[in-house]
Image (tube, helix red, strand yellow):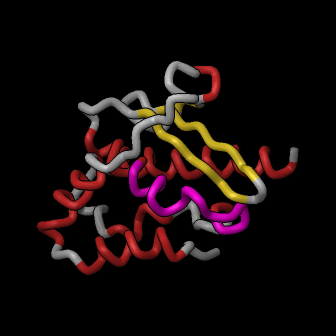
Amino acid sequence: MSVPSSLQAVIDQFAGAPSSLRLPLLLEYAGTLPPLPEALAGAEDRFERVEECQTPLFLASEVEDGTVHVWFDAPEEAPTTRGFASILATGLDGRTVDEVLAVPSDVASQFGLTELISPLRLRGMEGMLRRLQRQVREAASA
């Protein structure tokens, strides 16, 4: 299993930051979660709820010509969840099907946040990735 360079760059950013700055960095990512495109605004039927997250988080993806596109809808008042969603969007949107499917399920542990946030929140990020990979697998095989 491997991590695409775009996601590895985010991992390296966290790994290079002192422990005391990792949580603020995650919160910075929360502020950079891309807004939904107009075509998806109000299209609830295109989104899947990520049940592993404590807060309501919804995921939509598509595969077009072997390229993965991913969107997350998360409430503003859930910065940790939005941060994880933004990291995955930054690291995986625009990547190939094979690159997305090759990301290890425990990638959340590589951000150096295990001592700063609860295991439940880390499982939420892992749930986001698992659901995204399932959606990509299904879309690629259709």
Q: Residue furthest right?
A: 142
Image location (x, y in percent) of residue 53:
43, 37
Q: Looking at this view, is 90 or 48 the one in front? A: 90
Rendered view: 38 above or below 107: above
Q: Residue at x 65, y 68 (%)?
A: 99
In the picture, which quadrant includes the C terminus? top right
The chief SS type of the magenta part is: helix
Q: Residue at x 56, y 73 (%)?
A: 4
Image location (x, y in percent) of residue 26:
26, 56
Q: Residue at x 15, y 66 (%)?
A: 21
In the rendered image, residue 26 lying in the magenta stretch gets the answer: no
Q: Looking at this view, is 17 or 70 the one in front? A: 70
Q: Residue furthest left?
A: 20
In the rendered image, residue 93 lying in the magenta stretch gets the answer: yes
Observer able to see residue 80: yes
Read off the magenta span: 86-99
Residue 96 falls left or right of residue 84: right
